[in-house]
Image (cartoon, rainbow, N blue to C red):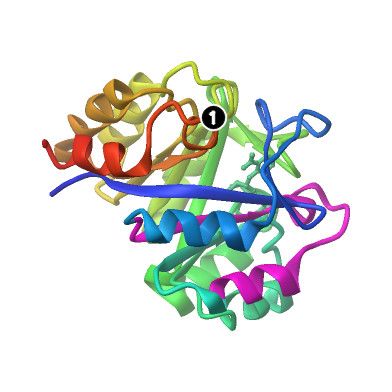
Protein backbone atom coordinates (compact mmCIF):
# COMPACT_ATOMS: atom_id res chain seq x y z
CA UNK A 1 0.00 0.00 0.00
CA UNK A 2 1.19 3.50 -0.84
CA UNK A 3 1.11 6.32 1.66
CA UNK A 4 -2.09 8.31 1.13
CA UNK A 5 -1.48 12.04 0.70
CA UNK A 6 -3.95 14.55 2.08
CA UNK A 7 -3.23 18.11 0.95
CA UNK A 8 -4.38 20.49 3.68
CA UNK A 9 -6.74 23.38 3.10
CA UNK A 10 -6.90 25.36 6.35
CA UNK A 11 -9.46 28.15 6.28
CA UNK A 12 -9.43 31.34 8.36
CA UNK A 13 -11.68 34.32 7.66
CA UNK A 14 -12.75 32.75 4.37
CA UNK A 15 -9.21 32.34 3.04
CA UNK A 16 -6.90 29.36 2.63
CA UNK A 17 -4.01 29.96 5.00
CA UNK A 18 -0.99 28.29 6.54
CA UNK A 19 0.03 28.93 10.13
CA UNK A 20 3.40 28.34 11.77
CA UNK A 21 3.11 25.93 14.73
CA UNK A 22 -0.64 26.63 14.74
CA UNK A 23 -0.20 30.11 16.18
CA UNK A 24 -2.85 32.70 15.41
CA UNK A 25 -1.28 35.72 13.74
CA UNK A 26 1.27 33.73 11.73
CA UNK A 27 -1.05 33.31 8.74
CA UNK A 28 0.19 33.32 5.18
CA UNK A 29 -2.80 33.60 2.86
CA UNK A 30 -3.20 31.45 -0.24
CA UNK A 31 -6.52 32.80 -1.50
CA UNK A 32 -9.76 31.04 -2.28
CA UNK A 33 -10.11 27.70 -0.41
CA UNK A 34 -12.19 26.14 -3.19
CA UNK A 35 -9.60 27.08 -5.81
CA UNK A 36 -6.88 25.53 -3.62
CA UNK A 37 -8.85 22.33 -3.06
CA UNK A 38 -9.75 22.03 -6.74
CA UNK A 39 -6.10 22.51 -7.68
CA UNK A 40 -5.09 19.59 -5.40
CA UNK A 41 -7.93 17.49 -6.81
CA UNK A 42 -6.86 18.31 -10.36
CA UNK A 43 -3.28 17.35 -9.48
CA UNK A 44 -4.40 13.88 -8.40
CA UNK A 45 -5.23 14.09 -4.70
CA UNK A 46 -7.67 11.44 -3.48
CA UNK A 47 -8.25 13.23 -0.18
CA UNK A 48 -8.36 16.79 1.11
CA UNK A 49 -7.79 17.62 4.80
CA UNK A 50 -10.10 20.61 5.25
CA UNK A 51 -9.83 22.62 8.47
CA UNK A 52 -12.01 25.38 9.87
CA UNK A 53 -9.35 27.25 11.83
CA UNK A 54 -11.74 29.90 13.14
CA UNK A 55 -13.91 27.15 14.64
CA UNK A 56 -10.82 25.45 16.10
CA UNK A 57 -9.81 28.74 17.74
CA UNK A 58 -13.39 29.39 18.92
CA UNK A 59 -13.55 32.77 17.16
CA UNK A 60 -16.32 32.09 14.63
CA UNK A 61 -16.56 29.61 11.80
CA UNK A 62 -16.48 29.08 8.05
CA UNK A 63 -19.12 26.37 8.15
CA UNK A 64 -21.12 27.33 5.05
CA UNK A 65 -18.01 27.95 2.99
CA UNK A 66 -16.52 24.58 3.96
CA UNK A 67 -19.81 22.83 3.16
CA UNK A 68 -19.74 24.41 -0.30
CA UNK A 69 -16.12 23.30 -0.79
CA UNK A 70 -16.95 19.71 0.17
CA UNK A 71 -19.97 19.81 -2.16
CA UNK A 72 -17.88 20.99 -5.10
CA UNK A 73 -15.21 18.29 -4.74
CA UNK A 74 -15.20 14.78 -6.15
CA UNK A 75 -12.50 13.58 -3.77
CA UNK A 76 -12.87 12.43 -0.18
CA UNK A 77 -12.68 15.05 2.54
CA UNK A 78 -11.46 14.81 6.13
CA UNK A 79 -13.16 17.73 7.87
CA UNK A 80 -11.68 19.23 11.01
CA UNK A 81 -11.92 22.12 13.42
CA UNK A 82 -14.58 22.98 15.96
CA UNK A 83 -16.46 19.67 15.83
CA UNK A 84 -17.28 19.43 19.52
CA UNK A 85 -20.96 18.57 20.01
CA UNK A 86 -23.92 16.92 18.31
CA UNK A 87 -24.87 20.03 16.34
CA UNK A 88 -21.40 20.67 14.92
CA UNK A 89 -20.92 16.96 14.22
CA UNK A 90 -24.26 16.75 12.41
CA UNK A 91 -23.41 19.86 10.37
CA UNK A 92 -20.00 18.43 9.48
CA UNK A 93 -21.30 15.00 8.45
CA UNK A 94 -24.16 16.55 6.47
CA UNK A 95 -21.62 18.21 4.15
CA UNK A 96 -20.94 14.76 2.67
CA UNK A 97 -17.38 14.61 3.97
CA UNK A 98 -15.93 11.11 4.28
CA UNK A 99 -14.83 11.57 7.89
CA UNK A 100 -14.40 14.15 10.61
CA UNK A 101 -11.43 14.79 12.84
CA UNK A 102 -12.16 15.45 16.50
CA UNK A 103 -9.57 17.32 18.57
CA UNK A 104 -10.63 19.30 21.63
CA UNK A 105 -13.79 17.32 22.33
CA UNK A 106 -11.85 14.06 22.51
CA UNK A 107 -9.90 15.58 25.40
CA UNK A 108 -12.60 17.60 27.14
CA UNK A 109 -15.65 15.40 26.60
CA UNK A 110 -14.55 11.75 26.63
CA UNK A 111 -18.11 10.43 27.07
CA UNK A 112 -19.34 12.23 23.95
CA UNK A 113 -16.29 11.09 22.03
CA UNK A 114 -16.93 7.44 23.02
CA UNK A 115 -20.58 7.84 21.99
CA UNK A 116 -19.81 9.21 18.52
CA UNK A 117 -17.16 6.54 17.92
CA UNK A 118 -19.79 3.90 18.75
CA UNK A 119 -22.39 5.60 16.54
CA UNK A 120 -20.30 6.63 13.53
CA UNK A 121 -17.31 4.26 13.52
CA UNK A 122 -15.01 4.88 10.57
CA UNK A 123 -16.42 8.36 9.96
CA UNK A 124 -14.58 9.49 13.10
CA UNK A 125 -10.87 10.15 13.48
CA UNK A 126 -9.32 11.63 16.59
CA UNK A 127 -6.63 14.25 16.26
CA UNK A 128 -3.75 13.78 18.65
CA UNK A 129 -2.11 17.19 18.48
CA UNK A 130 0.99 17.15 20.66
CA UNK A 131 3.90 19.15 21.96
CA UNK A 132 6.31 16.55 23.24
CA UNK A 133 3.85 14.07 24.71
CA UNK A 134 1.39 16.69 25.98
CA UNK A 135 -1.81 17.05 24.01
CA UNK A 136 -3.03 20.43 22.80
CA UNK A 137 -6.64 21.62 22.63
CA UNK A 138 -8.69 24.73 21.79
CA UNK A 139 -6.71 25.90 18.80
CA UNK A 140 -3.62 24.37 20.40
CA UNK A 141 -3.69 27.10 23.07
CA UNK A 142 -4.52 24.82 26.06
CA UNK A 143 -2.92 21.66 27.36
CA UNK A 144 -5.14 18.60 27.05
CA UNK A 145 -3.44 15.83 29.00
CA UNK A 146 -0.93 13.07 28.44
CA UNK A 147 -0.76 11.52 24.98
CA UNK A 148 -0.29 7.96 26.19
CA UNK A 149 -3.09 8.08 28.77
CA UNK A 150 -5.52 9.52 26.23
CA UNK A 151 -4.43 7.03 23.57
CA UNK A 152 -5.04 4.13 25.99
CA UNK A 153 -8.52 5.47 26.69
CA UNK A 154 -9.34 5.96 22.99
CA UNK A 155 -8.07 2.45 22.24
CA UNK A 156 -10.44 1.03 24.83
CA UNK A 157 -13.28 2.93 23.15
CA UNK A 158 -12.43 1.53 19.72
CA UNK A 159 -11.22 4.75 18.10
CA UNK A 160 -10.90 3.80 14.43
CA UNK A 161 -8.15 6.20 13.30
CA UNK A 162 -5.74 8.82 14.62
CA UNK A 163 -4.42 12.01 13.04
CA UNK A 164 -1.12 12.64 14.81
CA UNK A 165 0.25 16.19 14.61
CA UNK A 166 3.50 17.39 16.12
CA UNK A 167 2.40 20.97 16.71
CA UNK A 168 6.00 22.16 17.00
CA UNK A 169 6.65 20.95 13.45
CA UNK A 170 3.43 22.15 11.84
CA UNK A 171 3.98 24.79 9.16
CA UNK A 172 7.74 24.86 9.80
CA UNK A 173 9.09 22.71 6.94
CA UNK A 174 11.37 21.00 9.51
CA UNK A 175 10.53 17.39 8.71
CA UNK A 176 8.00 15.04 10.32
CA UNK A 177 8.46 13.56 13.80
CA UNK A 178 9.13 9.98 12.78
CA UNK A 179 9.94 8.83 16.33
CA UNK A 180 6.59 10.06 17.60
CA UNK A 181 4.79 8.28 14.77
CA UNK A 182 6.69 5.04 15.45
CA UNK A 183 5.78 5.25 19.14
CA UNK A 184 2.09 5.86 18.43
CA UNK A 185 2.00 3.02 15.89
CA UNK A 186 3.61 0.68 18.43
CA UNK A 187 0.67 1.33 20.79
CA UNK A 188 -2.22 0.95 18.34
CA UNK A 189 -3.24 -1.29 15.46
CA UNK A 190 -5.46 1.48 14.10
CA UNK A 191 -4.34 3.52 11.09
CA UNK A 192 -2.43 6.71 11.75
CA UNK A 193 -2.38 9.84 9.59
CA UNK A 194 0.84 11.82 10.03
CA UNK A 195 0.67 15.60 10.16
CA UNK A 196 3.21 18.34 10.59
CA UNK A 197 6.57 19.26 9.18
CA UNK A 198 6.69 17.64 5.74
CA UNK A 199 9.22 19.65 3.77
CA UNK A 200 10.56 17.46 0.98
CA UNK A 201 10.01 14.40 -1.15
CA UNK A 202 12.55 12.63 1.08
CA UNK A 203 10.26 13.32 4.08
CA UNK A 204 7.45 11.60 2.20
CA UNK A 205 9.71 8.67 1.33
CA UNK A 206 10.66 8.42 5.03
CA UNK A 207 6.98 8.44 6.02
CA UNK A 208 6.34 5.73 3.41
CA UNK A 209 8.76 3.44 5.27
CA UNK A 210 6.32 3.62 8.22
CA UNK A 211 3.35 2.31 6.23
CA UNK A 212 4.00 -1.27 7.45
CA UNK A 213 3.94 0.08 11.03
CA UNK A 214 0.51 1.64 10.51
CA UNK A 215 1.07 5.09 9.03
CA UNK A 216 -1.67 5.19 6.43
CA UNK A 217 -1.37 8.74 5.21
CA UNK A 218 0.28 12.11 5.50
CA UNK A 219 -1.18 15.59 5.59
CA UNK A 220 0.89 17.98 3.50
CA UNK A 221 0.43 21.72 3.85
CA UNK A 222 3.12 24.36 3.71
CA UNK A 223 5.44 22.39 1.43
CA UNK A 224 2.79 22.28 -1.30
CA UNK A 225 1.80 25.93 -0.92
CA UNK A 226 5.46 27.02 -0.83
CA UNK A 227 6.04 24.89 -3.94
CA UNK A 228 8.83 22.83 -2.37
CA UNK A 229 7.50 20.11 -4.70
CA UNK A 230 4.37 19.55 -6.72
CA UNK A 231 1.61 17.19 -5.69
CA UNK A 232 2.31 15.16 -8.84
CA UNK A 233 5.92 14.73 -7.69
CA UNK A 234 4.74 13.81 -4.20
CA UNK A 235 2.33 11.18 -5.50
CA UNK A 236 5.09 9.72 -7.65
CA UNK A 237 7.49 9.67 -4.68
CA UNK A 238 5.10 7.74 -2.42
CA UNK A 239 4.24 5.27 -5.16
CA UNK A 240 7.95 4.48 -5.57
CA UNK A 241 8.20 6.04 -9.04
O1 LIG B 1 -4.23 22.80 11.39
C1 LIG B 1 -3.79 23.75 12.04
O2 LIG B 1 -2.85 24.47 11.61
C2 LIG B 1 -4.40 24.07 13.37
C3 LIG B 1 -3.87 25.11 14.08
C4 LIG B 1 -4.41 25.44 15.31
C5 LIG B 1 -5.48 24.72 15.78
C6 LIG B 1 -6.01 23.69 15.09
C7 LIG B 1 -5.48 23.34 13.86
N1 LIG B 1 -5.96 22.32 13.09
C8 LIG B 1 -6.99 21.40 13.25
O3 LIG B 1 -7.99 21.66 14.21
C9 LIG B 1 -8.27 20.44 14.83
C10 LIG B 1 -8.79 20.60 16.18
O4 LIG B 1 -10.05 21.22 16.17
P1 LIG B 1 -10.96 21.02 17.46
O5 LIG B 1 -10.04 21.09 18.61
O6 LIG B 1 -11.59 19.68 17.30
O7 LIG B 1 -11.90 22.15 17.42
C11 LIG B 1 -6.93 19.75 14.86
O8 LIG B 1 -7.00 18.38 15.05
C12 LIG B 1 -6.39 20.07 13.50
O9 LIG B 1 -6.90 19.20 12.52
Judged from this view, the residue extending furthest toward the bottom is 94
| Front position in the image: 209 or 122 | 209
Q: Is residue 76 visible?
A: yes
Q: Name the one closer to the observer, 52 or 179.
A: 52
Task: Locate residue 95 relative to residue 184 in the image: left or right.
Answer: right
Q: Residue at x 30, y 44 (%)?
A: 232
Q: Is residue 2 left or right of residue 153?
A: left
Of the 4 image quadrants, the one containing the C terminus is top left
Residue 199 horizontal/vertical position (percent): 43, 23
Residue, far right = 59
Crowding around mark 1 (Cα neighbors within 10 Å: few <14, some 14 to 19, many 20+) is: few
Residue 159 visible, this angle: no
Q: Position of residue 87 (x, y in %)?
A: 73, 78
User: Could you say where residue 36 lies in the image, as x and y percent from the top left?
Assistant: 56, 54
Q: Which residue is mark 1?
A: 226
Residue range of the region highlighted in magenta in the rendering: 45-70
Query: In what element is the residue under mark 1?
Result: loop
Residue 79: image quadrant is bottom right
Amino acid sequence: MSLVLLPAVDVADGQAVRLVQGEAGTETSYGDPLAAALAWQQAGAEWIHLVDLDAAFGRGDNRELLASVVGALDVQVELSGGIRDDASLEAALSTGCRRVNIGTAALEDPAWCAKIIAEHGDKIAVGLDVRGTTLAARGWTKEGGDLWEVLDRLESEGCPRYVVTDVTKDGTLRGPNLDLLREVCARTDRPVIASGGVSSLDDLRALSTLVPDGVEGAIVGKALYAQAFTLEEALAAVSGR
